[in-house]
Amino acid sequence: MMREGELRKLWERTVRRLELEGILRDERVKEALLKWPRYLFVEERYRRYAHLDEPLPIPGGQTISAPHMVVIMLQLADLKPGMNVLEIGTGSGWNAALMAELVKGEVYTIERLPELVEFARRNLERAGVRGVHVILGDGSKGFPPRAPYDRIVVTAGAPEVPRPLIEQLKPGGKLIIPVGSYHLWQDLLEVIKLEDGSIKTRNHGGVAFVPLIGEYGWRE
């Protein structure tokens, strides 16, 4: 079992490497990564690998994303203090913790697997993260009670952009979502809702995520 100090040093090296590679460019994202390192959000047996820039297993046959991918999505989301944010796919709770740090407030995050809801809640509580509300449900439907949102971040691949998520965006709001095939390859889309309600989409290249399961995603 590695000690906290050893894990911390390895994680700091990872953050620095992401900077040197030109992936990590936002100082606020860097500060969030250093405050909430990935090793706090994986099972004990995977903590020694948490600094590696690759996905790791979490319960329910799911994964915690590679650090570089989390950085890319957070920088695209351009989160600011006070924003109303929804995450689809809680997983381990790590990304929600980072988002809560960036908005300096509350984040709502939806997870369809009960075991991951409990896993994320335990991780967040143990780490001391505040302001993250983990909800059990079908994330492809969004979360109407807290809509409209400034930002929606989806951490699973959808066959197409779910209509409810567009509807729950504020004018001027932004949706970050992988769209493409079931379990192979998707395009990372930045979907911006303009003030007149129309949509502008930017494609940021290929990614690989677990599938978004739900009424407006893939069917089980």
Image (spheres, rainbow, N blue to C red):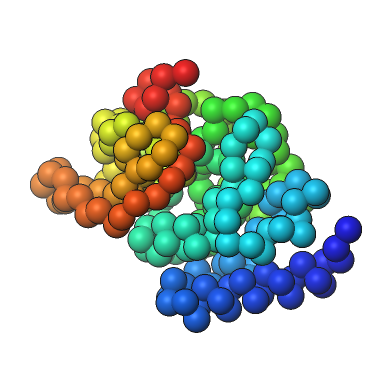
Asked if residue 208 can be seen in this view, the reply is: yes
In the picture as drawn, the residue positioned furthest to the front comes out as 184
Q: Is residue 57 left or right of residue 81?
A: right
- Say which residue appears at 32% left-offset and 38% top-offset: 180
Image x and y of residue 170, in percent: 27, 46
Q: Is residue 210 above or below residue 67?
A: above
Q: Is residue 199 left or right of residue 16?
A: left
Nearer-the-camera pick, 113 or 109: 113
- Say which residue appears at 34% left-offset and 25% top-offset: 216
Q: Is residue 44 above or below residue 143?
A: below
Image x and y of residue 61, in percent: 62, 33
Nearer-the-camera pick, 126 or 45: 45
Q: Is residue 151 left or right of residue 201?
A: right
Nearer-the-camera pick, 14 or 36: 14
Image x and y of residue 87, in percent: 46, 44
- Say which residue appears at 88% left-offset and 58% top-offset: 1
In the picture as drawn, the residue positioned furthest to the bottom comes out as 20
Asked if residue 74 can be seen in this view, the reply is: no
Image x and y of residue 82, in percent: 43, 59
Q: How many marks?
A: 0
Q: Quadrant of residue 3?
A: bottom right
Q: Is residue 63 above or below residue 216?
A: below
- Say which residue appears at 39% left-offset and 25% top-offset: 218
